[in-house]
Amino acid sequence: MPDKKISPEDLAKAFEEFNKNSVELIDYFASLEKKVFDLTMELNKSKRLAAIGEMSTVLAHEIRNPLAGMRLSAEMLKKDLKGDKEHNFLISNILVAIHRLESIVTEILAFAQELNLNLGEVGLEELLRDAAMAVEYKRAQKHVDIYADLSVKYIRADAFHLHRVFVNLLENALDAVPENNGRIIIESQSVCGGGVQVKVADNGPGISDDIRQKILEPFFTTKERGVGLGLPICFRIVSAHGGKMDVRNHEEGGAEIVIWLP
Ligand SMILES: Nc1ncnc2c1ncn2[C@@H]1O[C@H](COP(=O)(O)OP(=O)(O)OP(=O)(O)O)[C@@H](O)[C@H]1O
Ligand SMILES: [Mg+2]
């Protein structure tokens, strides 16, 4: 068999091809390495969050009973101290603190509990009125106006869980708006492809991109007395309905939380 001589040009071409392939291969490995790194980080984060969730539930359960005992004792003491203003003031402070702790515990347990939806026809007007009642104290303190413009009045949902969603959204909006000229607008409308959209908009400072990225992480809060479970709970409830939730800023400023329900 005659020897086939490889010309220097062929050799150079082959070498060039080899070089090109190696560079591609190196790029490919680098991207794989990055993917593995990202996935590992993601896994660590979910593991950490799962562990935090589990630990919090146990803690919440353990804290609930002694708290109930404390509240009962404080209420009994308050009854006994009818006329004593100074002591009454101190006991009221204790009761407010206990109430705050109880709502934190309730929030943690609500986040951890399984969601079993009980779907039915829900009147949005009544649902929003009840949610507004739940935050009336905070609303009145800051003199905030809440408006509702409901094109859609009835939706199919779980009234109990949806109430929680709107209480959380209203609480956040009330925390964000300025005192004395705060404004919250709730709108509902039907969506072309089916389903309903409900928006809760406020005239607060809005939400920066930085914060928006972390907003659905359990226990992320920028508030001194926040727990950081309000929006994650809303997200969970809306997702359980097969819906979607978007946190964005309104063109005219302020935050706008949009919920789509099928
Ligand atoms: N309407 C809003 N305007 C501006 N920032 C908001 C608004 N809603 C939520 N945020 C930001 O998102 C963060 C997370 O909200 P989330 O409701 O999950 O927790 P939280 O309100 O801090 O505590 P809590 O568990 O008591 O609700 C808030 O701390 C706040 O920084
Ligand atoms: Mg909140």
Image: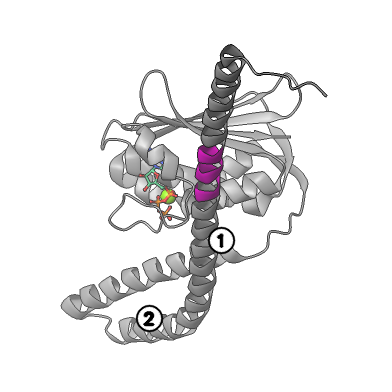
Residue 260 visible to the viewer: yes
Residue 207 location in percent, x, y? 37, 34
Q: Amino acid at mark 1?
A: Phe
Q: Residue furthest front?
A: 2
| Image point (79%, 21%), residue name | 2
Q: Which residue does the numbered mark 1 point to in the structure image?
A: 111
Q: Residue furthest left?
A: 86
Q: Amino acid at mark 2?
A: Glu
Q: Quadrant of residue 9?
A: top right
Instruction: State which region is magenta.
Output: 29-37
The structure's colour scheme is one colour
> Would residue 104 appear left or right of 84 to someone viewing this image?
right
| Image point (50%, 39%), residue name | 30
Q: Quadrant of the C terminus?
A: top right
Residue 119 location in percent, x, y? 77, 49
Asked whether 35 falls inside the magenta stretch, the response is: yes
Q: Residue furthest top?
A: 9
Q: From mark 1 to mark 2, how far is it between C-alphas?
A: 29 Å
Residue 49 location in percent, x, y? 50, 61
Asked whether 5 falls inside the magenta stretch, the response is: no
